[in-house]
Amino acid sequence: MAIQPIDLQAIFTQLDKVGRNQSALKEGQQILQSVQQVQTQRKLEENVRSVNEAQDMGSEAGKVKDENGRGARANQGGSRDKPEEEDDSSEEEKQDMIRDPALGRNIDISG
């Protein structure tokens, strides 16, 4: 089947539309890639600036211990975990240690 001159006239009039469509598709892909790059860059910057959540260190990591070495929650009910004899020996050890009265009272904000 041969192409007739009238068909060529119809094709030539539509060529500018085809060219515009092709260039729009190429530009659309480039714009999409640049938008994705900007989004990934923002996510990376946000991850750098954000505070990371601490890893799970087990159930014992969050407990605060008092001077006798017991958990803070153990003393809430008024019950004691250790007998009186062990408390006496820890008091003797406390008397042997020298303590600075200003220790823990000053905060260094110089940085």
Image: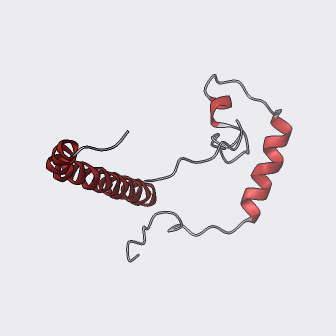
* Residue 7 at x, y percent in the picture: 21, 42
Quadrant of the rendering where the C terminus is positioned: bottom left
Q: What's the coloring here?
A: secondary structure
Tell me what residue is drawn at x 20 percent, y 51 percent.
15
* Residue 32 at x, y percent in the picture: 33, 51
Return the residue nearer the eye: 40 or 47. 40
* Residue 47 at x, y percent in the picture: 45, 55
Is 76 placed left or right of 88 in the picture? left
Q: On the image, which quarter does residue 60 sit in?
A: top right
Q: In this view, does 27 lie above or below 100?
A: above
Quadrant of the rendering where the N terminus is positioned: top left
Tell me what residue is drawn at x 29 percent, y 55 percent.
31
Q: Is residue 19 above or below residue 69?
A: below
Return the residue nearer the eye: 75 or 56. 56
Is 43 placed left or right of 67 in the picture? left
Q: Is residue 82 above or below residue 90?
A: above
Is 3 placed left or right of 82 in the picture? left
Residue that extends furthest to the bottom in the rendered view of this protein? 110
Q: Is residue 80 above or below residue 25?
A: above
Tell me what residue is drawn at x 63 percent, y 36 percent.
72
* Residue 108 at x, y percent in the picture: 42, 72
Tell me what residue is drawn at x 44 percent, y 68 percent.
106
How many labels, in total? 0
